[in-house]
Amino acid sequence: MPVKKRTVARGNRKGNVASKADKKEGEGMMTPAMGDVIIKARSEMKRLTGLEPDSTVKALKNDKGWLILIEMIEKRSIPDSMDILATYEVLLDDSGNLVEFSRTGMRKRVDTAVNEG
């Protein structure tokens, strides 16, 4: 006698645990995690500018998408405390695709006072 296989349907029904990759309510797309968006922004900026990312200064989800501020190394120096760092404002859409970027300031690494505005 053949053995029947039993299948179990999985989904977001009451009582099931929601997964990390749940879709946003009312939308057909998944919202990327902040860490994934930051990694994508840093990678895209390196590819587009040819500069090395140094630090992520800010990450914010707003109605336009993801706003990420990244410091990139504009010019390496010896000693490295004299490196020139530039702050780039990067906007990604809700899916994590780069929409625009602009350089908003520059400083020497040794200059710790930063005007954020």
Image (cartoon, helix red, strand yellow):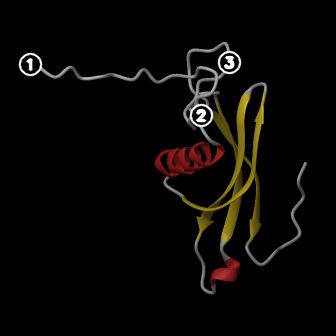
Compare residues 79 and 64 and report the one nearer the observer.
64
Per the image, the residue denoted by label 2 is: 17
Secondary structure category for the residue under label 2: loop
Is residue 72 left or right of 10 when viewed as pictured?
right
Quadrant in the picture for residue 80 = bottom right
Is residue 110 left or right of 28 when viewed as pictured? right
Above or below 73: residue 28: above
Query: Circle 1 — which element?
Result: loop
x and y percentages locating residue 8 in the rendered image: 39, 23
**Residue corresponding to mark 1:** 1
| Residue 4 % position (x, y) | 21, 20
Q: CA distance from mark 2 to mark 3?
A: 16 Å
Residue at point 69%, 64% (across, down): 85
Q: Amino acid at mark 2?
A: Val
The mark closer to the camera, 1 or 2, is: 1
The residue positioned 77% from the left and 78% from the top of the image is: 110
From this view, report whether residue 54 is shown above or below residue 94.
Answer: below
Q: Amino acid at mark 1?
A: Met
Residue designated by label 3: 25
Q: Quadrant of residue 65?
A: top right
Image quadrant where residue 78 sits: bottom right
Which residue extends farthest left?
1
Asked if the residues shown at circle 2 and circle 3 are in contact, with their CB atoms under 8 angstroms apart, the answer is no
